[in-house]
Image (cartoon, rainbow, N blue to C red):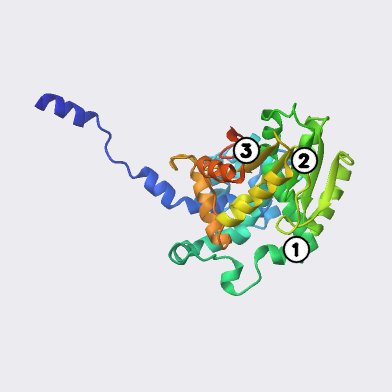
Amino acid sequence: MKVLTKKRSETRQAPNPAKIMETGMAFWASKVLLTAVKLELFTYLSKGKVPAHKIQKKLQLHTRAVYDFLDALVSMGFLEREGLKENALYSNTADTDAFLDKHKRSYIGGMLEMANNRLYPFWVHLEQALKTGDPQNETAQGEKPFFETLYEDEDRLREFVSAMGGFQMGNFMAFCNRFDFSNYNTFCDIGGAGGFLSAQVAIQHPHMKCITFDLPKVARIAKENMARIDCLPRVEVRAGDFFKDDFPKADIIAMGNILHDWGIADKKLLISKAFDALPEGGAFVAIENVIDNQRRKNSFGLLMSLNMLIETAEGADYTEEDFTRWTREAGFRKTTLIPLTGPSSAAIAYK
């Protein structure tokens, strides 16, 4: 028995501090990437290989750390490099070329720009948020809430709507490919922002008639977008407030990153309004970073829920079991979950 015990102890992995240090200092890597996005490095490199001295001049960088900055991005897998230092040529990877070039419709950097400009400093106060339960964004400094300020500035609102559409495009496309639309004819996206989910449904499923529904200032932007990508009139743009107004009637009611903005009472209200707007057999779809039921695997979903603590008075992300319980209370008969891209899923309830 002693020999066996010794062998077992010898095969047991020794404690390793690597993950602790990597996570504890992850803000270093995060800030390097966020700064590169803000400086539009990946957009500049979209045309091909560029030597460091040209990057330095374009981005107005000091000579002291230009190689450390660029090579850190190489080591993290965000840049390609040929040669070394003075002889080096830098270029985008396939991922950064696809998703961090501002000239491409697939650009997702808007979310990273907001993370750098807004969320990064607010997250310094996570400890305070955990102890008080209070938001730590602009409201903690006595300023207007972010969205209230956003709606007052047309240019910022347009930039934000476009950025969020780009950030979610992969999920929208995955949903359109993986959900069976054959038994449905009408679709409505509540809080549809720029209308991009409705547009994807209309493009990929020509038999569907779609509605994108949001506040009047956002609806104007959506209407311009639909005209530009030639989705009018199959995507109708309607203006309204999803708390104050009835939802448009449709076979499918969708919400993308809407429920997690609100507390449980408001979540249930929105789910109930979706139920009322659907016919028998209709589907309610929530596209979110749905947390796994055991709350062990979807780290991004859990971190997003902490971000809702930072940003909102009551918002939080939720598990599939939470979604099932709330939708059953509203009268839905069954639920399912369709994985989309990365940590995101489409939680679906059928009436």
The quarter of the displayed image where residue 149 is located: bottom right
Badge 1 amino acid: Tyr
Q: Is residue 257 visible?
A: no
* Residue 129 horizontal/vertical position (percent): 48, 64
Q: Can residue 189 be seen in this view?
A: yes
CA gap between label 1 and label 2 equals 28 Å
Closer to the chain start, of discs 3 and 1, is: 1
Are dots 1 and 2 in contact, CB under 8 Å?
no
Badge 3 amino acid: Ala
Closer to the chain start, of discs 3 and 2, is: 2
Q: Please state which of residues 194 and 275 is positioned toward the viewer in this rendering.
A: 275
Q: Please, what secondary structure does the residue beneath circle 3 have?
A: strand
- Marks 3, 1: nearer the viewer: 3
* Residue 54 horizontal/vertical position (percent): 69, 49
Q: Please, what secondary structure does the residue beneath circle 2 have?
A: loop
* Residue 67 horizontal/vertical position (percent): 56, 49
Residue at horizontal 49 percent and vertical 53 percent from the top: 28
Closer to the chain start, of discs 1 and 2, is: 1
Q: Please, what secondary structure does the residue beneath circle 1 have?
A: loop
Residue at horizontal 67 percent and vertical 58 percent from the top: 60
- Crowd band around label 2 with a 10 angstrom C-alpha radius: few (<14), some (14–19), many (20+): many
Residue beneath label 1, please? Answer: 151
Badge 2 amino acid: Ala
Q: Please state which of residues 79 and 194 is positioned toward the viewer in this rendering.
A: 194
Residue 250: numbered disc: 2
- Crowd band around label 1 with a 10 angstrom C-alpha radius: few (<14), some (14–19), many (20+): some
CA gap between label 3 and label 2 equals 14 Å
Residue beneath label 3, please? Answer: 349
